[in-house]
Each structure stands twice: as C-alpha cells, then as structure tokens.
Amino acid sequence: MGFEDPSLTLSIAGARPIVIKRVDAIPVALPLSQPMKMAHLTITTADNLLVRIESEDGVVGWGEAASAPSLTGETQAGMVATVRDWMAPALIGQDARLRAALMRRLSRAVYAATGSKSAIELALTDLVARTLCVPMALLLGGLFRDSVEPMWLLGGGSADKTVEEARRKKDEGYTFFKLKAGIRPVEEEAACAVAVRRAVGDAMKICADANSGFTAASARRYIAQSTDASLLFLEQALPASELDALTALARESAIPLCSDQSVHSIADIAVHADRGVRGVALKLLKFGGIEPTLKAAALCEARGINMVIAAKIAESSIASAAMAHVACAVPLIDWGVSLTHVYLAEDVVKTKLVMRDGRVALPDGPGFGLTVDEAAVERCRVRALS
C-alpha cells in the first residue's frame, strides 16, 4: 500500500528527501514503580506502543502512545495491527518531510485510531528533526519557554501515606500536586486534600482528578468539604456522558472544573467551554498527534480556557519528552504539565528527563532530545504481539 498521488512530492534546492525505509510497531510492557490506583482500575504495567521509523540514510525517529481503551477505544494489540498492517505500508518510500500531508492521508485512510496516529506523527517529527539536527520544538512553531514545571500525582493510599508522599516530593523539588479522587469515600478524600494543603503550605499548587469517579451528588460534597485545600481545579468530576449534570455543577462549583475524558476534539472544547468548564486536559493520543493538539491549544487560548498538557499514565521518556516540547511551544500552561515517565520502574532511554529546582528543562539533543536504549526496548517487548 502506498500513496500514488504525484502531488506528494517536495522539491527544495539543496535539501534531500528523507525517504522512509522501515516502520516498526513495537508493543512494550513497562513496569510501574508502584501500582497506580484510579477511579475504575489499578495499573501495574504500562502497555504501550512504540513506533520506530528509519530513513534510507539510517536516521531513526521514535514515537509512543499508551493503550487506553477507556479513553481512545484502542487496545495495545489493536494499535500494533493498525500501524503494522495499515499505516506502515502507506509510509514506506515516502518523504518524511511531508509529514503533515502524510498524516492527513492516514487520517482519511483509518478512522479514529488517535493513539496510533499520534505515535506515528511523533516518530515522523522526531525523524525529521533528527535529520535536520534541530530540537523537535523548532518544528512546532518555536518556543515560549525552555522548561516546564511538572506535577506529581498523589493518592490511592491512606491520607497519612499521601501526606507523607507530598512532603517527600516537596523536598525533592515538586511544587505542583494532583490528587487522585473518586476512589475512596468522599469525606476521606476531601479531608486528605485539606491535610495535604496544610502539610505542603499555601505556595504549592494542588488540583484533584476524579477520572469520572464522582456522581453529581458526591462531587458537590467533595467540593464543599475540600474548600480549605484551595484546589486550583477539579478534573473530570463526572462521566463524559453527563453533560447536563456537568453544566449544573460548573455553574455552582467554587472550584473551577477541568475536562479530560470527555474532550477528544476541538468541537468538544467549544461544547465544554459553553457549559462553563474552565479548563481541558490536552493529550496527544486523544487528539491524534501534535498538529491537532496545537490547534486545540490555540482554541483554548482564544476562548480563555486553561490547559493541562499531559502524557498518559504511564508513558516513557519518549512521549514525556515530546509532551515537554509541545508544552514549551504552547503560550499558556497555567494548569500544569504532567510528565509520566517518572512513575516507571524501567524506561527505554539511556538518560531520563530529570527535574532540577522544580522544573524539567528541554533536552538539548536533536528530535525529542534523548537517545533510545534499544536493548531496553527489547527487554520490555511483548513477544506475543510482535
């Protein structure tokens, strides 16, 4: 399968095509440092897709997307099949510099599959940037900043353990915390939020994420009882289908509401803005890659909607570094950046992204800026799906 359209050519004096020689869909299981408990499931390993695209010149670009059936409808096996059987054949022999045109063709050829498309677009962008020896962010329109303030996810355990973890992470330099909610009784979770605030002080940013785990009634109780926690926002309080209840909650809530699982497109952003939601979580795998995510960010800015720039739980330093580049190319990120490689026991890069003085700087290498450890990729490969 290939693109027969002769218009998909690019002629620039002195510039060589970046001809795609090989596309690999690699399923990996990345172990978490500890189980991550959310409203409707507990995660112990990250079952992700890595995409490796190699040019005829031997340069390699990498992309990644987590499997998230409840968020995108894609399983790990499905993403592997989509990339291997449909997308890869369409890319072989094509010029990666035409990645925008190539992604548009893939979008027409394969419905939805936003995680698969995101992994492909990341790999194409990384390949082009590495070939040109420039950071990925320079292909995204330029930089508004060169570092980000990452948040740390708290919760799932007892209030005492959560407070202890918050104090420890504050000592490590974290200044932004997200509390997992919608898991335990509302009264316990609200009391925990207040306890964390008292433990870390007023200068720290704290938000909460229910992952659709509240009902309208329990969300109201949580908001009322966590007032002293001074939460910056409450994310995805209700299931995605309950838009009328969300509208009513947003109208009366003392805490700004943020939407994640219920926002998958630019049209969804407009709908939620009209219903009183004050922010949205932007994830590459929800929107289908970098380009649509940047368009979503532009709409948020135009509508006065706050943004959370977030990798999925838990992606490796490949996706986290790419998200850092996106976050540095977006004008406003007041509601935080979530880089999720920090929750992994094993990563697939030779040197991880690191935080210093509460911030993670963009790596200074070409592409997404880090070197993939292909031996680690092989150790984590899911053989049954390869």
Image (cartoon, rainbow, N blue to C red):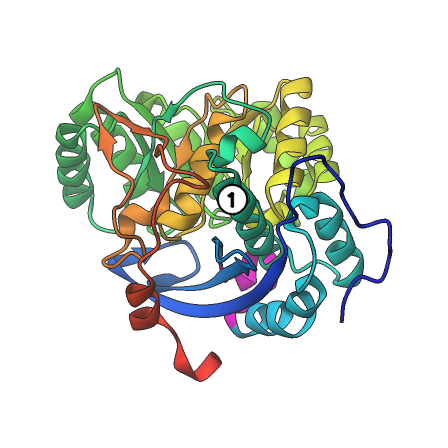
For the residue marked with disc 1, what is the amino acid? Thr
Where, by quadrant of the figure, is residue 339 drawn?
A: top left
- Give the quarter of the figure containing the N terminus: bottom right
Q: Is residue 16 above or below residue 114?
A: above
Q: Is residue 276 visible to the viewer in this orientation of the structure? A: no
Which stretch did the figure color magenta?
Answer: 66-76
Residue extending farthest bottom: 384
Is 194 positioned to the left or the right of 365 in the image?
A: left
Q: Is residue 189 visible to the viewer in this orientation of the structure? A: yes
Q: Count neighbours of disc 1 (C-alpha within 10 A) and say few if under 14, some if 14 to 19, many if 20 or more.
A: some
Q: For the point 62% across and 33% down, which residue is it?
A: 294
Q: Position of residue 343 (x, y in %)?
A: 28, 50
Q: Position of residue 104 (x, y in %)?
A: 76, 49
Where, by quadrant of the figure, is residue 19 drawn?
A: bottom right
Which residue occupies the foreground of this view, 65 or 136? Answer: 136
Q: Is residue 36 above or below residue 245?
A: below
Q: Position of residue 17 (x, y in %)?
A: 66, 48
Is 371 positioned to the left or the right of 74 in the image?
A: left
SS at circle 1? helix
Which residue occupies the foreground of this view, 65 or 367? Answer: 367
Q: Is residue 253 above or below residue 293?
A: above
Q: Is residue 72 magenta?
A: yes
- Tell me the residue that label 1 is attached to: 131
Q: Position of residue 44 (x, y in %)?
A: 31, 64
Is 307 positioned to the left or the right of 148 in the image?
A: right
